[in-house]
Image (cartoon, helix red, strand yellow):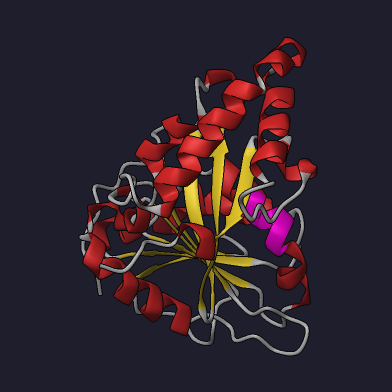
Amino acid sequence: MGNVTRGTTNPNRLRRMDRWIAATHGAVLRRAADPVAIDLGYGAAPWTAVELLGRLRSVAPRARVVGVEIEPDRVAAARPFERDGLAFRHGGFEIPVPGRPVLVRAANVLRQYDEDEVADVWRRLCARLAPADGDSPGGLLVEGTCDEIGRRHVWVALGPLGPRTVTFATRLGSLERPSDLAERLPKALIHRNVPGEPVHAFLRDFDRAWAAAAPYASYGARQRWIRAVRDLGTDWPVTDTAGRWRQGEVTVAWSALAPRAH
């Protein structure tokens, strides 16, 4: 189920997303009886799946990764890279693996789809996630977009019941203003960056906080970012702390940025 993507990929492109997943979802992966992660639509080369396995195993040694691609030739080309904990399968949004995965990562997959198709894809993928159980929040779907070398990345994190948060991540040394990240908004948000929509107001306020934090630039871009995010958090539901801000990230509750109904 789904369409063939362009397949563009580069080594280390998804490092920001992977590190965030390891930091925020590592405990769930460690507790899972079968910690399976899906790299959905990994593209023309298997680098992202190989890297995901290494980063997840740094926090969850039993983690397994299955790369899923809708283009059969890409699956065949990836098979020589299979090893303990890493496999490749032909498929799409149906996720052709037994059981319910603890993680599904879909990076740069929905960019080519129409905005009105996103909600159905999200529902289909969330229905395949491991359910919440007791203290566990259940599986995680991470869906977003980044540039070709992974300097700027925005993703939505969804649980079995739907979207939870939006994370903005960037290489601070190359950032002029936070709204530069607008070009990497996921498909669910990129066409909503217009006056009257919450994501537009968020990026406007982020730019203002960044400008107000300019004196902190003398201590480096990281300190300026931290100060800007701290100020932004007085008006927006920032859900993470300075430990993540130092990585050039900020995570906000989805409810605050969700598109307005028309």
Residue at the top extreme, as displayed: 218
Look at the image and tell me in which quarter the C terminus lies.
bottom left
Which residue is found at the position 60% from the left and 86% from the top?
131
Query: Which quarter of the picture shows residue 53?
Result: bottom right
Question: Quick check: 114 above or below 98?
Answer: above
Which residue is found at the position 53% from the left and 87% from the top?
99
What is the span of residues highlighted in magenta in the rendered image? Answer: 20-25
Spot occupied by residue 105 in the image (x, y as percentages of width and height) = 49, 61
Spot occupied by residue 190 in the image (x, y as percentages of width and height) = 33, 48
Which residue is found at the position 49% from the left and 58% from the top?
156
State yes or no: residue 121 in magenta: no
Left or right of residue 59: residue 109: left
Which residue is found at the position 78% from the left and 41% from the top?
242
Q: Main secondary structure of the magenta part?
A: helix
**Does residue 244 show up?**
yes
Left or right of residue 116: residue 147: right
Who is closer to the viewer here, 242 or 48?
Answer: 242
Left or right of residue 220: residue 179: left
The image shows a total of numbered marks equal to 0
Question: Quick check: 200 above or below 166?
Answer: above
Question: Quick check: 112 above or below 172?
Answer: below
